[in-house]
Image (tube, helix red, strand yellow):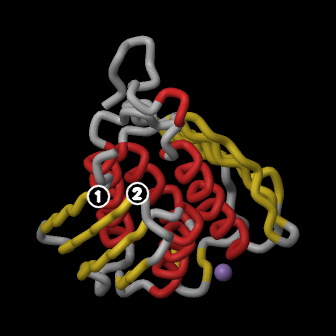
Amino acid sequence: MAERRAEISRKTNETSVSVRVDIDGKGTSKISTGVGFFDHMLDQLARHSLIDMEIEVKGDLHIDDHHTVEDTGIAIGQAIAKALGDRRGITRYASLDLAMDETMTKAAVDISGRPFLVWNVAFSAPKIGTFDTELVREFFQALAQNAGITLHILNHYGANNHHIAETCFKAVARVLRAATEIDPRQADRVPSTKGMLA
Ligand SMILES: [Mn+2]
């Protein structure tokens, strides 16, 4: 089995992002984006996907968090796509309902090579602390687009916006873990009748 690791460095006038991932990791993370709440969410993403992540971002936070969050999503997506290579042997599909206190959120993924986000989550406040809640969608849109995955996120219910955001990250983490796992019954094959997924 080849190592499923990758590194992406991306620099624009708005941000400088470097990301390293190891799909077959232990969920360790070293994350510094300059946005506290976002760091907390990315920690959850690494921890519950078991994908090791090193993420360092210097963004134009004097404007707002938008470019930093979106460009981090782009780079993580690109790193995951690169690490997965031709997607040979993967389980491909996974879905999960994840509970956290009063909140319940579903994530479903197809590691398909077909980028698509279905976002069915509403926040009841524009901010969590200083973090714009609308950036949660921006992150997952960038991730799905650049990882080449179909991703559906549905919040069934919930009252606390921190919990709603956190269940999105944890649920996506768990389905990424399951769907990128090697399926021993088809470890040498790309799981598509087309013969390709990348
Ligand atoms: Mn939390």
* Residue 22 vertical position relative to residue 185 in the rendered view, above or below: below
Asked whether 42 or 186 is in front, the reply is: 186
* Residue 53 vertical position relative to residue 190 in the rendered view, above or below: below
Asked whether 12 or 115 is in front, the reply is: 115
Marks 2 and 1: in contact by CB < 8 Å? yes
Q: Quadrant of the N terminus?
A: top left
> Which residue is disc 2 drawn over?
23
In the rendering, at what x and y percent does residue 49 appear?
A: 54, 61
Task: Name the amino acid type tagged 1.
Answer: Arg
Q: Residues within 10 Å of mark 2 (few under 14, many from 20)?
A: many
Q: Quadrant of the C terminus?
A: top left
Residue 133 visible here: yes
Asked which secondary structure carries label 1, the reply is strand
> Which residue is disc 1 drawn over?
5
* Residue 99 vertical position relative to residue 94 in the rendered view, above or below: below
Query: Which residue is at 40% across, 52% downward?
Result: 143
In the rendering, at what x and y percent does residue 98 appear?
A: 75, 57
